[in-house]
Amino acid sequence: MKQATPANRNSPYTQLKSLNIGDCQWTSGFWADKFQLCTNAMVPYMGDVLCGDVGHALNNFKIAAGEKEGEHQGMFWHDGDFYKFMEAKTYVYAHTKDKALLKELDEYIDIIAKAQENDGYLQTQVQLRKDVDRYENRKYHEMYNTGHLLISACIHHRVTGQGNFLDIAIKHADLLYTIFMPDTKHYGRFGFNQTQIMGLVELYRTVGDKKYLALAEKFIDNRGKYEVKHHPTTEGYPIGDMVQERTPLRESHEAVGHAVLALYYYAGAADVYAETGEKALIDALDRLWKNVTTKKMYVTGAVGQAHYGASVNRDMIEEGFIDAYMMPNMTAYNETCANLCNAMFSYRMLNLKAEAKYADIVELVLYNSALSGISVSGKEYFYANPLRMLNNTRDYNAHENVTETPNREPYLSCFCCPPNLVRTIATVSEWAYSLSENGISVNLYGANHLDTRLLDDSPIKVSQETAYPWEGRVKLNIEECKTEAFSISLRIPKWAKNSKLTLNGEELTMLLEPGSFAHIERNWKKGDVLILDMPMEAEFIEGHPRIEEVRNQIAIKRGPIVYCIESPDLPKDTDILDVYFNGNKKLDPTYRPDFLGGITTLDGEIFIRKDKGDGIYRPVQKPEWMPYKTQLIPYYAWSNRGQAEMTVFMPVIWND
C-alpha cells in the first residue's frame, strides 16, 4: 500500500518537512538495539498488559462493545493509553511489515468500532458509568482520550492506507465539532489536557477538512477567555494555572501548571501555527520554549519540577512547573510523559524554524530523561525521574502514591507514560532527518539507512555509519541522488566543540559552530562520503547560581549523555551523599557491550567522606577522605541492578 502524505508535508509555515514513516531504518548500534527491543519486548509486553486483566484497557472497549461483562477499570484516561499503544504497534508495523501486527490492530479496531456510539461518542470511562454524563466534568479526561484517538487513527491510515480506524476518528471529531465549536460558557473552559488540539490538526492534515483546524484554534482561543472559578464542569479538579487557563496563550510568558498539559498544549499550538502562520502564536511559543529550557529544565532535559506546589498566582499545581530555578534533585518529579512532551514540542519548533537548538533539546531528552523511564529489559517503568535517590528517606506508599517509586515497576496503575515512551522509541527514526526546501536536514545521529524522496520528488538514498552516542564520528555515504545541486545540513550539537568535517577525504574549511546546522550545498553524486568528527570528552556541568540545590556541585556529561553514580559501584553501605568527585582525575570512557544493554562507562576516582556527624546541623573540621576508583554510568541506565541510591550532581574536590 502506498503511504499517505506525511504529517506536515503540505503545512505552509514549516521550514522542514517530515519523512514518510519507515523511510529511515536503523541498521546497527544504539537506536537499532532500542528499536529491536521495542519490537521484540516492549510492544509485546505492553500488549500482554493492556489486552489482559492487569491493564484492562481492551476489556473496557469489549464491555462497551457488548462483548464482555464487567465494569470500567483503570484511570479515566486509560482509553488514551491504549490508543498510544496502538500507535506504537503501527510504527513497528511500518518498519517490519509484520502482517500479524496489522491483523491484531484490525481486531482492536473492530472492537473499538462496536464500542463507539451511533453519533460518534467514544469514551469507555463515561459510557460504563451510569452516574456520569457525556462532557459533564473535565476531570474525566475526555479531551485527552480524544486527542490520542485522532492521532493514532491518522498514523494508522498514513501507514496502512486503510480507513477503518480513520472512520472512527472522523465520526468522533464531527461530534466534537457540533458540541464545542459554538460559543457556550458551559463548555468554554472544558478543553483542558489539550491533546485534542494536536489530534484535530493531524486529522485536518489527513482529510483536508478545515473545520477540524478551526476547532483546534477554538480550543486555543478559549484558554484564558473565561473567569477562573469553579463551575459544574470543573468541580473535583484543580483550576487556574494548573490547566493553563489564567492567561491566554498569546499573552503567556511563563510555563505554568501541569507540565504534560502545558507541553501538549504548546505542541498543539505549534501545529496550528504550522497551518495558519499567526505571528502572535509563534511569538508566544518562542517565549514559552525559552522559559522552559533556560529556567525550568533539568540537565537531563526533564521538566515538571514538583509533584505538588503552587504557581505565582497561588493556584495549586500537581506534577508540574513551579518557580524558575527551583530545581530539587531528590524530590524532582520529572514525569516521563512531561519529558517526552518537551521533546515533542521542540521537534515541532525544529520543523517550524529549522534551528539546531531545538534538535539539541530533542536529543538531550531522548538519551536521558526519556530512556530513564524504562528498564534495559523494556518491561519496567518509571513515572517520575528524580536526579537523586536515597534509601529509607521517603514513604513511597504515603497518600496512595502510584507514581513515585524507588524502583521501576512492571505495571503502573497510572499507565500514561509507558505507551507514550514506547511509541516515541518506535518513531525516533522519523525524527532523525527532515526534508528542507532543496535537501535534507540531519537532526539526530545513529547508524541508519535513509531511502526517501526530496520535496521535488527526486530519490535520495543515504547510509549513516556511526557508534554514536558513544563515539562522535559520523560517516554519511551518498548512495543515490539527483544530479542537480542540493543541500545536506548537519546539526553540530551545542556540546560538540572543535568538530571537523571532511568530504571525500578533504577537510572542509567552513565554520562549524556548536548549536547550529552546517549547510553543504553542491552537486552531490553517488559515492560521495561526508564525515563529521565531533570530539567527545567528558565535561563538568554546573547549574545556574540560582539553583540552590546544586550550588558547588557538578554533573558529568559526555556527548549527549548525562552520567550518574549509583550505589552498586560504591563500597557496601556507602551513602550516596558522602560521595565527592575528584576533579583532578581524568575520566576514561570504556564501552561495555554486555553491561546494562551496552553502554560506555566513565572510569575515574571519587572521594568518600569518612567522618560523620549527627543532627540537622553539626560542627565540622577538615573532612577525612577515602579515595575510591569506580565508574559512572549513563543516567538512563540506573536502577537496573536492584534498589539503589543514585545521584547526578556531586560536590567536587579540586586539589592544587
Image (spheres, grey):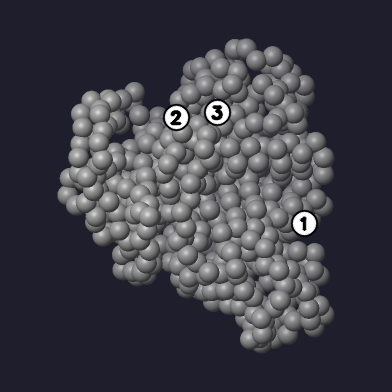
Residue named by callout 2: 307
> What's the CA distance linking mark 1 and mark 2?
37 Å
Taking depth in this image into account, of 87 and 195 the one nearest to the observer is: 195
Please report the residue visible at 23 percent of the width from the left and 25 percent of the height from the top.
Answer: 615
Disc 3, SS: loop
| Residue 52 seen by the camera | no
Residue named by callout 1: 15
Place of residue 87 in the rendered image (x, y in percent of width and height, measured from the top left): 54, 51
Left or right of 176? Residue 601 is left
Q: Earlier in the sequence, mark 3 or mark 1?
A: 1
Please report the residue visible at 69 percent of the width from the left and 31 percent of the height from the top.
Answer: 253
Q: Which quadrant holds residue 385?
A: top left
Place of residue 149 in the rendered image (x, y in percent of width and height, measured from the top left): 59, 42
Q: Which quadrant holds residue 596?
A: bottom left
Image quarter (top left, top right, bottom left or bottom right) of the N terminus: bottom right
Place of residue 125 in the rendered image (x, y in percent of width and height, measured from the top left): 49, 30
Q: Amino acid at mark 1?
A: Gln
Circle 3 packing at 10 Å, graded few (<14), some (14-19), many (20+), is some
Please report the residue visible at 21 percent of the width from the left and 32 percent of the height from the top.
Answer: 613
> What's the CA distance linking mark 3 and mark 1?
33 Å
Residue named by callout 3: 323
Disc 2, SS: strand
Residue 220: which disc?
Answer: none
Q: Earlier in the sequence, mark 1 or mark 2?
A: 1
Circle 2 packing at 10 Å, graded few (<14), some (14-19), many (20+), is many
